[in-house]
Amino acid sequence: MTAWFDRLKSGLQKTRAGLADSLSAVLRGRKGLTDADLEALEEILISGDVGANLSASLVSELRVASRRDPGDPLDLLQSILVARLAQEDRSLRLRADGAPTVLLVAGVNGAGKTTTIAKIAAHLRAEQPALPITFAAADTFRAAAVLQLGIWSERIGADLVRHQEGADPSAVVFDAVDHVERTGGVLLIDTAGRLQTKHNLMEELRKIERTVVRKLGRPSDERLLVLDATTGQNGIAQAERFHAAIDLTGLVLTKLDGTAKGGVILSIRESLGLPILFVGVGESAEDLHAFSAGEFVEALFAE
Ligand SMILES: Nc1nc2c(ncn2[C@@H]2O[C@H](COP(=O)(O)OP(=O)(O)OP(=O)(O)O)[C@@H](O)[C@H]2O)c(=O)[nH]1
Ligand SMILES: [Mg+2]
C-alpha cells in the first residue's frame, strides 16, 4: 500500500460514504440483479453526480454484464467504472528532445491553478533535482496572485518571470518563453481565473497561447484545465468553454476530498473525452498525484 493510495483513500472518504458505500450495499454478494436493484443503483449514481445519461448507460451495461457473468455484481460494476475512466489514460507530456516543455494552466478563480502548478513543480523537482523549472506569473490582475506564485517559486527553487500588476499577461508569457528557450526545462504558466467578463478571460487565454506559438514556433505541450470537483456538473459546461478557447489537452480535478459527489469524475471524463492527468485530494504537494483509473476505483471502494 503506497502513501499516495492511503491519501487517495482518505481523500475519497466523503464520496465513499455518499456513493460507493451505497453502491456496495445494493450490489455486494448479490446473485442476479432485479429491476428494483438496477433502479436503486441508477438513483444512487445520479445523486452521486454521475449524470443522468451516464448513470443510465452504466446501469444498462451492468445489466448486460451481470446476465453473462455470474460473478459479484459489485466487481462487475468496478470493472465497468475502471474501463470508462481509463480511456486514453496517460501521464504529463514532458518533452524528451531537449526543447523546453510548456504547460499552460487555466481554470476559473479558486479552482486550484496556482497550487496545482506548485504541486506539479514540487513533484518534478523531487524526481529531477537538476531540471530547470520556470513559472510565468500571467495572472497579472491581482498583485496577490504574483506574490503567491513568487513564494512557491522560492520554496521549490523555480525561476519566476513576472511583470507588474495589470501588465499584459501575454507579455509575461513572451518573456517567460524567451527565458526557457535559454534555460530549457519546464515552463508552467499560471493564468487568471477571473477578469471583467468570461469572454475576456477566454480571449486572454487564446492570446496567451498565440504568444506561445509565435515565440516558440509550436503550441504549448499541455493546455490543462484545473477543475474544482465540488462544482459538480457545472464543471462540464465550464470545461467546454475553455476547451473551445484553447483546445485543452487534459484535466486536473482538484478538491475531491471536499465533495461527496466525486462521481462527477465519471461524467467529466465521459462528456469531455479528455484525459485526467492529475487528481487532488488536499492542500499539500503529496495530495496531488497522477491519475490512475484502477487505483481510483480501488481506493473509492476500499473497505
Ligand atoms: N481541500 C483541497 N483544497 C485544495 C485542493 N487544491 C487546491 N486547494 C485549495 O484551493 C484554494 C485555491 O487554490 P489556488 O491554487 O489559489 O486557486 P487558483 O485557481 O489559482 O485561484 P485564483 O488565482 O484566485 O484564480 C487554496 O486554498 C488551495 O490550497 C484540493 O485538492 N483539496
Ligand atoms: Mg491563482
Image (spheres, rainbow, N blue to C red):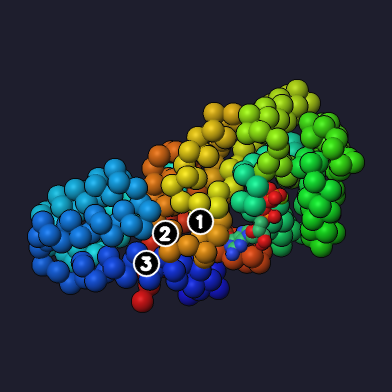
What residue lies at 35% left-to-right and 51% top-to-bottom? 50
Marks 3 and 2 sit apart, C-alpha to C-alpha, by: 7 Å
Of callouts 3 and 2, the N-terminal one: 3
Looking at the rendering, in which quadrant would you find the C terminus? bottom left
Marks 3 and 1 sit apart, C-alpha to C-alpha, by: 13 Å
Q: Which mark is residue 230?
A: 1
Q: Badges 1 and 2: C-beta atoms under 8 Å apart?
A: yes
Q: Is residue 295 left or right of residue 108?
A: left
- What secondary structure is found at the residue carrying circle 3? helix
Residue with the most extreme front position:
196
Q: Is residue 213 visible?
A: no
Q: Which residue is mark 2?
A: 261
Marks 1 and 2 sit apart, C-alpha to C-alpha, by: 7 Å
Q: Badges 3 and 1: C-beta atoms under 8 Å apart?
A: no
What residue lies at 21% left-to-right and 66% top-to-bottom? 27
Image quadrant where residue 167 sits: top right
